[in-house]
């Protein structure tokens, strides 16, 4: 069993079958976004989510080994969220419009 195998699991039906921290629902994609896109350090992520540094670095190693695939998933998720935001009305905005009209 390799070092990554002790830290990263891929289990159908858990976290959508995406690679994740073993025993947790925190995905490699989550770690990649927090680290590369939001600029959080490995120490910050480990402390905030009660993970070991080995978990974080294993997730980052997995991410860099599969970066094209995971980045594509991130991009598709961002596109989906953009579409949902454009097509879903905000209850708060509707309430504010109602209050202004009254």
Image: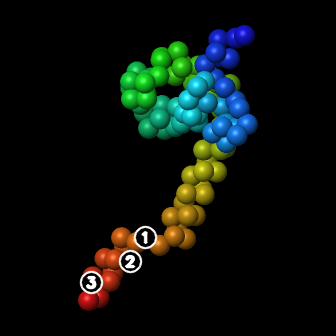
Residue 62 in the figure: left or right of residue 50: right
- For the N terminus, the quadrant is top right
Residue at position x 70%, y 40% from top?
13
The residues tagged by marks 3 and 2 sit, at their Cα atoms, a distance apart of 10 Å
Secondary structure of residue under mark 1: loop
- The C terminus: image quadrant: bottom left
Residue at the bottom extreme?
102
**Where does residue 4 sit, x and y in percent of width and height?**
65, 16
26 to 51, vertically: above or below: below
Secondary structure under badge 2? Answer: helix
Q: CA distance from mark 1 to mark 3?
A: 15 Å
Which element carries disc 3, helix, strand or loop?
Answer: helix
Question: Which residue is nearer to you in this view: 9 or 79?
Answer: 9
- Per the model, the C-alpha gap separating discs 1 and 2 is 6 Å
The vertical placement of 82 against 13, above or below, is below
Q: Position of residue 39 (x, y in %)?
A: 42, 33
x, y percent for residue 66: 69, 30
Name the residue: 48% across, 38% down.
37
Taking the image as shown, residue 39 lies to the left or right of residue 55, namely left
Disc with the residue nearer the chain's start (3 vs 2):
2
Tell me whether circle 1 and circle 2 mark residues in contact (CB < 8 Å).
Answer: yes
- Asked where in the image residue 79 lies, by quadrant, the reply is bottom right
Residue 97: x and y, percent?
33, 81
Please give the label number shown on residue 26.
Answer: none
Q: Quadrant of residue 57?
A: top right
Residue 76 in view (yes/no): yes
Q: Are marks 1 and 3 in contact (CB under 8 Å)?
A: no
Image disc number at residue 94:
2
Point out which mark residue 90 bears. Answer: 1
Which residue is pictured at 48% across the width and 17% down the height?
53
Q: Which mark is residue 100?
A: 3
Q: Observer-nearest residue: 1 or 100?
A: 1
């Amino acid at each position: 069993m390799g070092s990554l195998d002790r830290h990263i699991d891929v289990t159908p039906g858990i976290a959508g079958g995406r690679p994740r921290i073993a025993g947790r629902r925190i995905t490699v994609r989550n770690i990649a976004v927090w680290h590369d896109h939001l600029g959080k350090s490995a120490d910050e992520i480990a402390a905030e989510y009660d993970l070991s540094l080995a978990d974080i670095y294993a997730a980052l190693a997995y991410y860099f080994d599969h970066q094209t695939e995971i980045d594509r998933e991130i991009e598709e998720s961002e596109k989906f969220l953009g579409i949902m935001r454009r097509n879903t009305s905000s209850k708060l905005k509707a309430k504010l419009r109602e209050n202004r009209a009254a």
